[in-house]
Image (cartoon, helix red, strand yellow):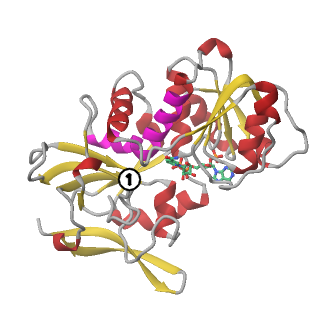
Amino acid sequence: MSEYKAYEVVEISDKKYQGGVVTKNVDDLPPGEVLVEVHYSSLNYKDALSANGNKGVTRHFPHVPGIDAVGTVLAAEGTDFSEGQAVLITGYDLGMNTAGGFGQLIRVPVSWVAKLPAGMDPATSMRLGTAGLTAGLCVDTLLKNGLEIDQGEVLVTGATGGVGIIAVSILAKLGFQVTASTGKPEAEGILKAMGASEILDRNEFSNSSPKPLLSERWAAAVDVVGGDTLFNVIKGLKYGGSVAACGLVQSPMFQASVLPFILRGVNLLGVDSVELPLIQKERIWKKLANEWKIETLDQVCSEIRLEQLEDSLATVLSGAAVGRFILNLRS
Ligand SMILES: NC(=O)c1ccc[n+]([C@@H]2O[C@H](COP(=O)([O-])OP(=O)(O)OC[C@H]3O[C@@H](n4cnc5c(N)ncnc54)[C@H](OP(=O)(O)O)[C@@H]3O)[C@@H](O)[C@H]2O)c1
């Protein structure tokens, strides 16, 4: 296989970008020890930013986005991987400035490549994708900081998005009482089916308020929104509570005061699944394949082909998506 199909984004004029399906050659790929035939990728918020020319994500175009991929090894000379082995790549520079999973072939450094965990099929790994890994890491971070079921409600913001809906599902599976904050009241049914016990309008969190503290409600929270929402979540944490902060869909900036930290001993825990050492990624993937396995995941996933990427990326960028898009690259 020397020629392959990919969704390539080009800069058509100053600050205008357009994506389309093109035929590329294996020689177009960057150097790396492992050549992988990609079977599935998935759509993440960062892919939508890359495909729209966000230079904070992708500096140079033409570019093939796709920050995650699952597939089989075609060549991996000098490594422990063998031809035909199922592998999973998420994060690092994949899809940012390295040609990503929106192409049928990728070539990457061996240090980025994880084995597909036993008990997980390739399509499921991309139904989860980077969003699932990140949700798992948020839950893991909260548990490591002492979160226990009898402490009370856990809030998840951006709950219908990829990270949010998977965080809701894992927390509910573990027995937590989960409250979902969303801008989509029509998604109440699906959020409850994934395990949320209460649904709140995200407008309750999105505006700055002069109040130094809010009444103590949340034992913990997973926040994908950032901005004023994150500070309002912090202000509503119970004494000693923690928020795992991983996203910025409202804003990367937030204005806060030290009061919740020094009067209630709350914790702001940063979560990054991109540069996380491979061994830690594999530990979370193993949990996602076993004790955190989500039986209902396919109910919130749509499978698309390369030709449908443009529309789906626009849906993700607008915040209108519910759940996950998985990209099938098999011809
Ligand atoms: N730190 C990491 O390693 C890491 C890894 C993956 C993702 N992330 C970040 O996590 C965030 C979520 O990623 P994702 O893949 O889950 O994205 P996504 O699928 O696009 O979901 C984001 C959700 O946020 C909500 N939302 C959108 N615009 C909003 C706004 N202006 N104000 C408040 N809520 C808004 C929407 O849910 P509702 O309608 O339900 O409110 C939307 O579905 C992104 O910022 C992404 O960059 C970080």
Q: Which residue is mark 1?
A: 92
- Residue 196: image x %, image y %? 61, 28
Is residue 130 part of the magenta span, yes or no? yes
Q: Residue at x 37, y 77 (%)?
A: 62
- Number of numbered discs visible in the structure rendering: 1
**Residue 58 appears left or right of 119:** right
- 29 or 199, nearer to the observer: 29
**Residue 78 appears left or right of 177:** left
> Magenta span: helix, strand or loop, mainly?
helix
Is residue 283 part of the magenta span, yes or no? no
Q: Residue at x 41, y 75 (%)?
A: 60
Q: Quadrant of the C terminus?
A: bottom left
- Residue 57: image x %, image y %? 48, 64
From what the image shows, is residue 153 above or below residue 160? above
Extent of the magenta region: 122-141
Q: Quadrant of residue 266?
A: top right
Q: Quadrant of the N terminus?
A: bottom left
- 239 or 306, nearer to the observer: 239
From what the image shows, is residue 187 above or below residue 236? below
Element carrying mark 1? loop
Q: Amino acid at mark 1?
A: Tyr
- Residue 272: image x %, image y %? 49, 44
Q: Residue at x 68, y 38 (%)?
A: 181
**Residue lying at the far bottom of the rendered structure:** 13
- Residue 294: image x %, image y %? 42, 29
**Residue lying at the far top of the rendered structure:** 150
